[in-house]
Image (spheres, coloured by chain):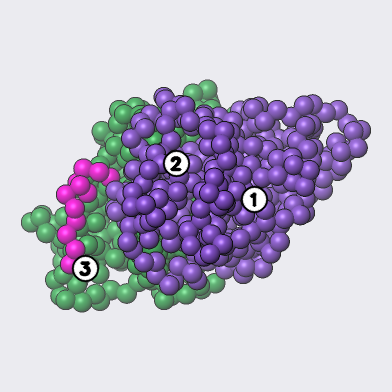
Chain colours: A green, B purple
Amino acid sequence: MKLGSLKAGRDGQLVVVSHDLAWCADASHIVPTLQAALDDWDSVAPQLQNLATDLAHDVIPKQRFHEHDAASPLPRAYQWADGSAYVNHVVLVRQARGAEIPDSFWEDPLMYQGGSDGFIGPRDPIPLPDEEWGCDLEAEIVVVTGDVRQGASREEALGAIRLVGLVNDVSLRNLIPAELGKGFGFVQSKPASAFSPVFVTPDELPGWKDGKLHGPLMVDLNDKPFGRADAGEDMTFDFGTLVSHLAKTRNLIAGSIIGSGTVSNRDADGGPGKPIDQGGLGYSCLAEVRMVEKILEGEMKTPFLSHGDTVRIWMEDEHGHATFGTIEQEVVKV
Amino acid sequence: MKLGSLKAGRDGQLVVVSHDLAWCADASHIVPTLQAALDDWDSVAPQLQNLATDLAHDVIPKQRFHEHDAASPLPRAYQWADGSAYVNHVVLVRQARGAEIPDSFWEDPLMYQGGSDGFIGPRDPIPLPDEEWGCDLEAEIVVVTGDVRQGASREEALGAIRLVGLVNDVSLRNLIPAELGKGFGFVQSKPASAFSPVFVTPDELPGWKDGKLHGPLMVDLNDKPFGRADAGEDMTFDFGTLVSHLAKTRNLIAGSIIGSGTVSNRDADGGPGKPIDQGGLGYSCLAEVRMVEKILEGEMKTPFLSHGDTVRIWMEDEHGHATFGTIEQEVVKV
C-alpha cells in the first residue's frame, strides 16, 4: 500500500493513496497520523491495507490526491540517519581532492545522524537565504523502520523495514568543509530535507530485493534530465546492513528513517559516470558532476543551485507512473 | 513549574511535580504528553501553571512522585543536539593527545546532532553489551525549546527556551576515534541518553541567568563525590548562542532538546581542574580525569565504567533538594 500525509497540523493527516496516486482515502478513523500507525503497526497495518483494497475497488469515499497538498509522509520524525551506501560517490568526492578512501569504507558503512524535527513538503520550495552557502540536491532512497532492537542482525533489520520512499537531502556544500573540519559531523550544513509524496510498503515494489530498490532514480534539473542512475546498482551496503549498523549500540524506535546516501553509478568502463547528454546515467547531486569535471577537465564548471532553479526527483513503475510521487522543488530567496 | 512524565506508552503521561518533588498531579485532562504541551505551549502552559499552583496549595488530588517511575520527560524527542560549550573540556581532551585547538573553537560553537528517538529513564540501568566499548558518563545541562525560526538571533533563541534539565549523555569512548575518523560525527559511539526526572521552567530557577544555569552540577561515581563543577562558570557559549547556532540554516521545531556539552571548570590557577579529594571541583566525565592524569602523570589511570558501576547526577536548590531530581544509573551487562 501507499501512504501519504495531507498537510494539517504538525503531523499531517494520514491518507491511503491509490496505486496510480490519482486518489486517496482518509485513514483518520483508523489512526490519525503515519507516526501513530508506525507506533502500532501490527494492528493498524492490516486495517490500512483493507482501506487500500477498498480504495482500489472503488467501494469507499475517495478524493483526488494532489501532491501539492502533501506534506512529507512523516512531517517530523524521531530519527533521520543517512548512510553513504554508494561508495562510488564517496570515492569520487575524495578523489577530486586527491584523497584515497580507506579500505574500511568498503566494509564499514559511513553514516551521519541528521536533524529530523522538521521536514519540508515534496512540492515546497527550498528556502535559501544565501546562495554562497552552495546549495545542492541529493537524491536518495529511504526506508522507515518499526522498532529495532539493539544488536539486530541484517536479517532482523530487513524484517523491520515498513516503508520505502525518496528524499531530497539538501546540502549546503560550502558550509561543509569548515563544519566537518570541527570533527563532529553535520549541523548547519544540512538544512531541512523533503521526502516523496508517498511512502510505499515493500510488498508493492517489484524492484525491492534483498534490501535494495532496483530501478532508475530520475533527477531533472531545470526541466532537463540530470540523473538516471539505477538505485539497485553499486549500492555497497543494502538497507538491512545500514539499519543494523545504526542499531549496533542502541534500540531504534518505530518511525526511524534511514537513507541510502546519494545514489551513484560507475560508468560502464568502471570510471566515474558520464553526464546524460554524453550517453551516461548522470548524477544524483551537483557535487558529483563537479568532481567529475575536476577529475576530467581540471576544474568544476557546474554551479550549485541558484534562486529560481528547480529540482525534480522520482522513480517510475512499469506503467510509467511515479511510484512515490514526485519531489519538485524550486530554490527561493528567503 | 516542574514537569515530568510517568512511564506509560511511548511518550509517558504528563504530570506536574511539586517544588520539592515529593508530589505530583496528573495533567492528562489538560494535555496527554509533554511533547503535546510543547506543541501548544502558549495555551497549555498557563493551565499547567494553574495546576502547579493548585498542587502547591494542596487543593487538588495528588500522588507521591517516585523518580523510579519517571521516564525521561521527553521519552522520545524530535531533536537532540548537543553542544560543547565548556571549551575547557575540549582543550583538555585535545591537549592530552598533543593537539592544539583552533582559535575558532572559542567563537564558533562545536555541536553534534544526536539520536533522539529513544531515551532511557533517569533511574534505568545503562545497558552495556561490551565493557571494551569504553562507557563514559557525561553530565550536562539541557534546554528544551519551542519553535525557533531559521536565522533566529541569540535573544530570540533565549526567549524560546521553555524548560531546563539535566542529561547523562552516555558515550562509548573506545568507539569514538574510529567513528570520528570517518568524518561524519557520532552514530554508534553515542547510545541512548537519560534525562533528569523533571524539567523545570526557567522562572523557577534562581540560578538561570543570561542563558546559563549557575550552581554546582553534582556527580557521584560509585557513591563517592566525583564532580562538583559550577555549570555557570567557564561556559563559553550560553544556551541562546547554542540554539541560535543550530537554527542558522533551518527552523527548529518545538520540543528540540539542546545540550551544553560536558560541564567543566578550570582550576583556580587556570590549569586543568583537580579531583575533589585534592581540593578541586572534580569532573563531569571520566574522559576528563583520564586526560588530566595523562597530562600530569603521563598515563591514564581511571578506567571507564564497568558492569555494576553506579553514576548519580543532580543539582541542589537552596533547601538542598534535588532541583531536577536525580539521574541514578547502574551499568549492566545485556
Residue B231 vs residue A102, the one in the foreground: B231
Residue A66 vs residue B297, the one in the foreground: B297
Which percent across, then down, holds residue A103?
A: 16, 49
Mark 2 chain? B
Which residue appears farthest toward the front when viewing the image?
B278
Label 3: element kind: loop
Mark 1 chain? B
Mark 2 or mark 1, whichever is nearer to me: 1
Mark 3 chain? A
Q: Residue at x 41, y 24 (%)?
A: B334
| Boundaries of the magenta span | A98-109
Instruction: Let me know if residue B25 is in the magenta part.
Output: no
Using the rendered view, name the quadrant where residue B75 is placed: top right
Label 1: element kind: loop
Mark 2 or mark 1, which has the lower sequence index?
2
Mark 3 or mark 1, whichever is nearer to me: 1
Question: What numbered label is drawn on residue A97?
Answer: 3
Using the rendered view, name the quadrant where residue B161 is placed: bottom right
Q: Is residue A266 above or below residue B200?
A: below
Task: Quickly name the residue at label 2.
Answer: B136
Which percent across, then down, holds residue B317?
A: 74, 46
- B98 left or right of B322 in image: left
Task: Quickly name the residue at label 1.
Answer: B216
